[in-house]
Image (cartoon, rainbow, N blue to C red):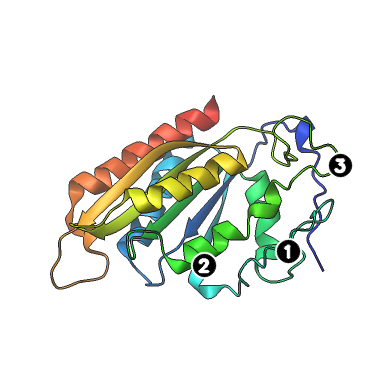
Amino acid sequence: MPWSCTPNLKNWRRPTLIKIVTVCGSPVSGSSTELLLKRIGDSLVGELGLKCHRTFVYLNELNITPCQACGEDPTPAGCFIDDDMTTLYPKLMTCDCLLFGSPIYFDSMSAQGKLFIDRCNCLRPANFANPNAGDGFVRRIHHHRPSAIVLVGGNKAWFEGARRPIAGYFKWLGVSNEATLIFSNNDINNRIGTVVDHPKVLAEADRIGQMLARKIRE
């Protein structure tokens, strides 16, 4: 069954339980992308000092159908495709912080990451009933949430090719991109999780988590 947009987000108030959603677009378990996302999350929770519920999404483990560009108005239900995205939509709409990470493949994000982003188009559908209202789209998310991006690639990777569409996705959701952490991996042996050998990058992940905690308090 299609997911239902039931929360009254216009009357949203800061909850006592902070919800953090982390989306990992790496197909490799234990990758530097995954480790950095978890590091930011750990730092955020430690700095926040409040009760938190963390959802870590491994896109590679999910069954997600590519967007079919149906052109229909997904209101009031949502996307007409019923797969693993169905359970993710409510989490994305009600979380207090969103973290998104991806390795760089062919100068862009991973296929898993792009597939996920394309399927989030229904979170801001066209306002066919009143095309002259505002920017012409129904805003289903009405509260400000801080977010951050993690990108991992080689020393010749073009990180901007992934950063730009992810930042655009955040803007589409109404999410504020507060930081982008880039790890340029020069390991010629292509080892998994090499970021553990880079204390400066790990320290930057800690700093981003602490900054996000302050944004949530605000």
Name the quadrant of the N terminus. bottom right
When the figure is inspected, residue 192 is found, relative to residue 196, above or below; the finding is below
| Closer mark to the observer between disc 2 and disc 3 | 3
When the figure is inspected, residue 108 is found, relative to residue 189, above or below; the finding is above
Which residue: 73% across, 37% down?
Answer: 136
Name the quadrant of the C terminus. top right
When the figure is inspected, residue 130 is found, relative to residue 64, above or below; the finding is above
Residue 98 appears left or right of 153: right
Q: Write down the residue under mark 2.
A: 59
Residue found farthest to the front: 132
> How far is mark 3 from mark 1, CA to CA?
17 Å
The picture places residue 53, in percent across and down from the top left corner, at 59, 50
Q: Write down the residue under mark 1.
A: 70
Q: Write down the residue under mark 3.
A: 129
Q: Nearer the viewer, residue 44 or 11?
A: 11
- Label drawn at residue 130: none
Q: In the rendered structure, which amino acid carries the disc numbered 3?
A: Ala
Does residue 96 appear anywhere in the picture? no
Are the two marked residues, 2 and 1, in contact with CB atoms closer than 8 angstroms?
no
